[in-house]
Amino acid sequence: MAAGTALRNPVDLPILAASFYNSWTPARLEIPHQHSVRLSLTNLSDDWHLFALGDDTALRDQDLIHKLMPDLRKDYPNTRLSEPGTTVTLPWRFDRAGTFSLRCVRAAHQGDGAVLSIQVHE
């Protein structure tokens, strides 16, 4: 299940930034339940990534799609395609409390352990 709701027209949302180069910095973000933010994700690596946000079930399903179509470069509401050296944003409202993950779902990168943990608390 998704961690919340993608926002189509974000205005003046607080920005939470994280950068990726083989691992995430910071490794964990904490966000209040029902809070809307703009996740700013900087790809410092020399490879493209398809960063996806969700719980284990949602990410498992996206993993399967990308194993079947490893060259797929498609944004979904909970994903952002990030080319090397770019910053992408993911405006999001966290509708559910819990622990969610943001990681690359590219077939070649699945299982590398580079996960940004997002704790949504009541």
Image: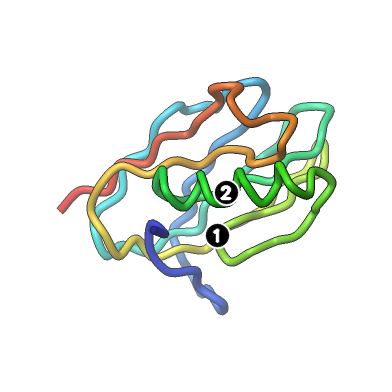
8 shown above or below 37: below
Q: What numbered label is drawn on residue 107?
A: none
Say few, some or many: other residues with alpha carbon within 10 Å of mark 1 (under 14 / 14 to 19 / 20 or more). Answer: many
Point out the residue furthest to the left here. Answer: 122
Report x, y in % for residue 62. Answer: 59, 50
Task: Give the left or right position of residue 5, taking residue 72 as reference.
Answer: left
Q: For this rendering, which residue is in front, 4 or 106?
A: 106
Q: Say which label, 2 or 1, has the lower sequence index.
A: 2
Q: Amino acid at mark 2?
A: Ala
Pointers 2 and 1 in contact (C-beta within 8 Å):
yes
Q: For this rendering, which residue is in front, 88 or 50?
A: 50
The residue that mark 1 highlights is 78
User: Which residue is rendered at x = 41% and y = 43% of the image?
Assistant: 56
Q: Secondary structure at mark 1?
A: loop
Report x, y in % for residue 30. Answer: 31, 41
The residue that mark 2 highlights is 52
Q: Secondary structure at mark 2?
A: strand
User: Which residue is rendered at x = 74% and y = 47% of the image?
Assistant: 68
